[in-house]
Image (cartoon, rainbow, N blue to C red):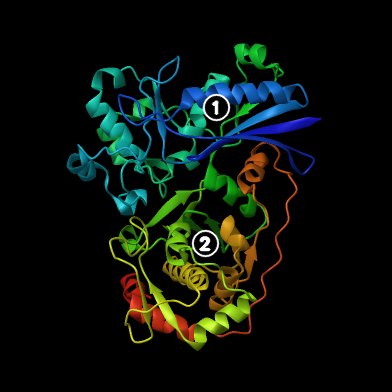
């Protein structure tokens, strides 16, 4: 059987997934942890590479792998020469603040780059700047700078390439509205190190002969340029929907990608940013640590029984409110300490913390959709797509926008498969029913107590 292999390198897990006949036929995964060893906290690419080749070897005995599509998170970047890395790739949680004052003066231009200042090494331009200043002799050997997905494509094919979803993902390296590199890239002399720009779906070449010999893969196995992981998920829905629509990628973070939305000028201070999709479009985006905040609000309390509608009705009968923020980073209320209060703003205890937390996340999602002036259907992808209270609350808050919870748990792999086969089958999920519970008055009170009204005013709503 012919199959497409997706090499998906995430912060927590690494997966090799085979897709064929309209679905996933095999998947191997392992936990991913960085190396704490000197010279700094860095990614365990050596372990990942050996493991991935072992999985491809085993899978090639059962299937004919025609294409390999690399996928990776967007907060890593590689400085390479002809043989590989000139320096270990930084883990984005490493503190690299030594040169921040100089860096911010050169890099920060939200109007041009659609990039806010993010913590630690989340801005990959900051990683390169730190490496260049801290390890100048080694960095001087750099022949090319590539995104994380393109690093794996380089190892597989021997061809270095640049790609839009990697460049346009909170990097400080790209100006999406003019489709060119940023002032930072020219000031630091990095433009000459940027390889030719290729599409995520482009075939960079066949696998290197030594990899074919080691793994048993066909020497004609094609290596695609690769894509940023959130954009792989987004591409799947982009292929099915006309603008406007929004994809809510949920998990530890809730990340909203609003096709046809607007990135507000004041968004830099609200954790709004621009992403560039695989087609080169600027996609207005916003994020907050929804999964982590839900955990902290719900705590160890057992979930109360009943339908989502029952739970919402009980919350409204004796209302209390979770006021942001319950995370230590990200979102439009960063730096504030979360509280649970009654309708008068006095400290209170929730009778059903799980419901309160889910409604809080729905209210935050609703607020950020407003900030992005998002319209049209809302696709829910990830763990929150199975949280019935969150779904019901969001559907009640956005009656003009169908809420479509996706049952897929492998949207990244299925989206990446489109790069090798654009005719890959896909269908939209069924819209969630809007509950017969009116929570607009609750939202009005929450926005007043939380300061969400000030956030809306800041962006002109």
Please determine whether, in this image, residue 261 is positioned above or below residue 329: below
Helix, strand or loop status at disc 1: helix
User: Which of pointers 1 and 2 lies earlier in the amino acid sequence?
Assistant: 1
Q: In which quarter of the image is residue 271?
A: bottom left
Q: Nearer the viewer, residue 334 or 420?
A: 334
**Which quarter of the rendered picture does the C terminus lie within?**
bottom left
Tell me where residue 452 sits by quadrant. bottom left
Relative placement, left or right, of 308 versus 105 is right
Viewer can see residue 279: no
**Res. 428 image quadrant:** bottom right
The reply to whether discs 1 and 2 touch (Cβ–Cβ < 8 Å) is no
Which disc, if any, is residue 153? 1
Instruction: List the single residue furthest toward the left.
Output: 101
Residue 308, position as x, y percentages in the image: 61, 75
Residue at position x 49%, y 42% from top?
165
Q: Mark 2 points at which residue?
A: 260
Marker disc for residue 330: none
Q: Can residue 98 be seen in this view?
A: yes
């Amino acid at each position: 059987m012919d199959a497409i292999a997706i090499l998906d390198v995430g912060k927590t897990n690494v997966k090799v997934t085979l897709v064929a006949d309209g679905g996933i036929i095999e998947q191997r995964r392992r936990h991913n942890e960085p190396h704490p060893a000197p010279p700094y906290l860095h990614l365990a690419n050596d372990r990942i590479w050996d493991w991935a080749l072992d999985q491809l070897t085993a899978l090639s005995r059962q299937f004919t792998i025609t294409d390999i599509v690399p996928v990776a998170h967007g907060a890593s970047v590689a400085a390479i020469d002809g043989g590989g890395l000139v320096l270990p790739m930084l883990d984005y949680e490493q503190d690299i603040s030594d040169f921040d004052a100089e860096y911010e003066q050169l890099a920060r231009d939200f109007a041009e780059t659609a990039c806010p200042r993010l913590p630690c090494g989340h801005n990959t331009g900051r990683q390169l700047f730190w490496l260049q200043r801290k390890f100048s002799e080694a960095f001087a050997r750099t022949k090319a700078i590539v995104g994380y997905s393109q690093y794996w494509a380089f190892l597989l094919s021997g061809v270095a390439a640049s790609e839009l979803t990697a460049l346009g993902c909170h990097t400080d390296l790209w100006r999406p509205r003019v489709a060119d590199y940023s002032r930072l890239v020219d000031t630091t002399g990095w433009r000459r190190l940027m390889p030719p720009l290729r599409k995520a779906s482009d075939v960079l070449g066949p696998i290197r002969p030594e990899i074919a010999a080691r793994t048993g893969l066909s020497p004609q196995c094609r290596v695609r340029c690769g894509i940023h992981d959130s954009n792989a998920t987004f591409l799947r829905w982009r292929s099915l929907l006309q603008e406007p629509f929004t994809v809510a990628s949920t998990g530890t973070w809730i990340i909203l990608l609003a096709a046809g939305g607007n990135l507000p000028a004041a968004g830099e201070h609200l954790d709004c940013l621009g992403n560039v999709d695989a087609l080169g479009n600027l996609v207005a985006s916003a994020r907050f640590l929804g999964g982590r905040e839900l955990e902290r609000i719900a705590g160890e309390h057992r979930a109360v029984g009943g339908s989502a509608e029952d739970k919402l009705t009980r919350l409204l009968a004796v209302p209390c409110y979770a006021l942001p923020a319950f995370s230590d980073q990200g979102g439009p209320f960063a730096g504030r300490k979360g509280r649970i209060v009654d309708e008068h703003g006095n400290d209170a205890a929730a009778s059903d913390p799980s419901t309160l937390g889910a409604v809080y996340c729905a209210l935050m999602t609703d607020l950020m959709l407003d900030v992005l002036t998002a319209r049209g259907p809302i696709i829910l992808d990830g763990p929150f797509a199975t949280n019935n209270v969150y779904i019901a609350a969001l559907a009640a808050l956005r009656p003009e926008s169908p809420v479509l919870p996706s049952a897929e748990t492998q949207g990244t792999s299925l989206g990446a498969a489109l790069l090798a086969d654009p005719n890959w089958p896909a269908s939209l999920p069924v819209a969630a029913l809007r509950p017969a519970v009116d929570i607009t008055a609750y939202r009005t009170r929450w926005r007043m107590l939380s300061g969400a009204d000030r956030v809306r005013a800041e962006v002109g709503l």
